[in-house]
Image (tube, rainbow, N blue to C red):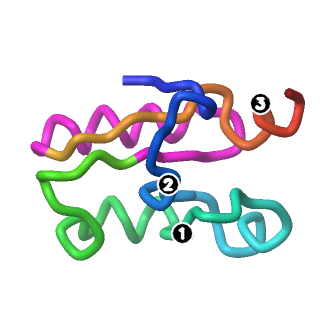
Amino acid sequence: MQIEYDDITDRTKIIDIRNSIDYNNNHIKASINIPRLVLMSNPQNYMNKKDSYYLICDKGKVSLSCARILNALGYNCYSIADGIEGIKNK
C-alpha cells in the first residue's frame, strides 16, 4: 500500500492531502491539492475506482491511513513513503 516516489510512473495522479498553506509552501509539481477532510468526505468527486492514485502528506503516516480507508471503499490508492519530508531529504 506504500510506494516510493521514484517508482510512480504517472505523477499526474498524485494527490497532496495537506492543507492549502502547506501545499503552497512546498509541493510536487504535477500533484493536485485536495485536503484530507475534503477528499475523505467525498472521494467519488475526485477519484474513480478504475485508476490508481498516490496520496502524499508531510511524513507518510496520514496518507497511509487515508489510503487504507479508501482502498477498503474500493479505490486503488497508495501512500508515498516518507511523504514530502522524505522526498526533500533525498
Three-letter amino acid code of the residue under disc 2 = Ile
Residue at image location 85% in from the left, 68% down from the top: 25
Q: Position of residue 28 (x, y in %)?
A: 69, 57
Residue contact at pointers 2 and 1, CB within 8 angstroms: yes
Q: Which residue is mark 1?
A: 32
Three-letter amino acid code of the residue under disc 1 = Ile
Which of the marked residues, 3 or 1, is nearer the chain's N terminus? Answer: 1
Q: Position of residue 34 (x, y in %)?
A: 48, 69
| Tag 3 secondary structure | helix
Q: Which part of the image, by quadrant, shows the N terminus?
A: top left
Q: Does the segment drawn in magenta span residue 81?
A: no
Towards the viewer: 45 or 52: 52
Which of the marked residues, 2 or 1, is nearer the chain's N terminus? Answer: 2
Q: Position of residue 8 (x, y in %)?
A: 50, 37
Q: Residues within 10 Å of mark 2 (few under 14, many from 20)?
A: many
Whether 18 is drawn above or below 34: the answer is: above
Dividing the picture into quadrants, the one containing residue 80 is top right
Residue at image location 25% in from the left, 44% down from the top: 70
Q: Which residues are magenta?
A: 54-74
Whether 40 is drawn above or below 63: the answer is: below
**Left or right, 61 with reference to 71:** right
Q: Which residue is mark 3?
A: 86
Total marks placed? 3
Q: Which residue is mark 2?
A: 14
Towards the viewer: 20 or 89: 89
Say which mark, if any, is on residue 1: none
